Image (cartoon, rainbow, N blue to C red):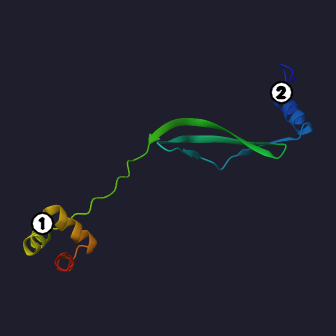
Amino acid sequence: MIPGRMNSREMRRLMAQMGIKSTEMDDVKKVIFVGKEKDYVIENAQVTMIEAQGVKTFQVVGDFRETPKKQEGKKEETFPEDDIKLVMDQTGVAREKAIEALKAASGEPAQAILNLTQK
């Protein structure tokens, strides 16, 4: 057990006897833990790496904050209204079908019309 009144020098000596190494990581300024729904950020971080029996453990102290992840929805493809109407007029299909054809034709109305009329 560790006595209640031990100075830092004695603590370091005792840790060395037990095979525990403690290293300050002075060049670390920020630590980010990436989660599924939010990230955890520690600014002005003071990081200590403690190595014992081949296992590295990190102690992090600093200003803590959570940041929610941005919703990454699928970007909806949009086509000029004139292209949609042209495909609809030339093929007689509904708007949704014309948009699907434009998607399949990489936005090229002529190719979309050809694809729809050749079916």
Give how far across and how far down residue 119 sits, in percent: 21, 77
Residue in the picture at 89% in, 39% down: 16
Give how far across and how far down residue 97 sits, in percent: 18, 65
Q: Which residue is mark 1?
A: 81
Quadrant occupied by the N terminus: top right
Residue in the picture at 21% in, 78% down: 115
Q: Give the mark nearer the N terminus: 1 vs 2.
A: 2
Q: Label 1 is placed on what type of residue?
A: Glu
Give how far across and how far down residue 29 sits, in percent: 59, 46
Residue 52 located left or right of residue 75: right
- Above or below, 76 against 55 in this view is below
Q: Which residue is mark 2?
A: 7
Find residue 14 and report its image quarter.
Answer: top right
- Above or below, 85 against 64 in this view is below
Residue in the picture at 35% in, 52% down: 73
Give how far across and how far down residue 5 sits, in percent: 84, 20
Image depth: mark 1 or mark 2 in front: 1
Q: Label 2 is placed on what type of residue?
A: Asn
Q: Are circles 1 and 2 on residues that touch, CB within 8 Å?
A: no
Residue lying at the far front in this picture: please name it: 119
Categorize mark 2 by other alpha carbons within 10 Å: few (<14), some (14-19), many (20+).
Answer: few
Residue lying at the far top in this picture: please name it: 4
| Observer-nearest of 18 and 107 | 107
Residue 12 located left or right of residue 45: right
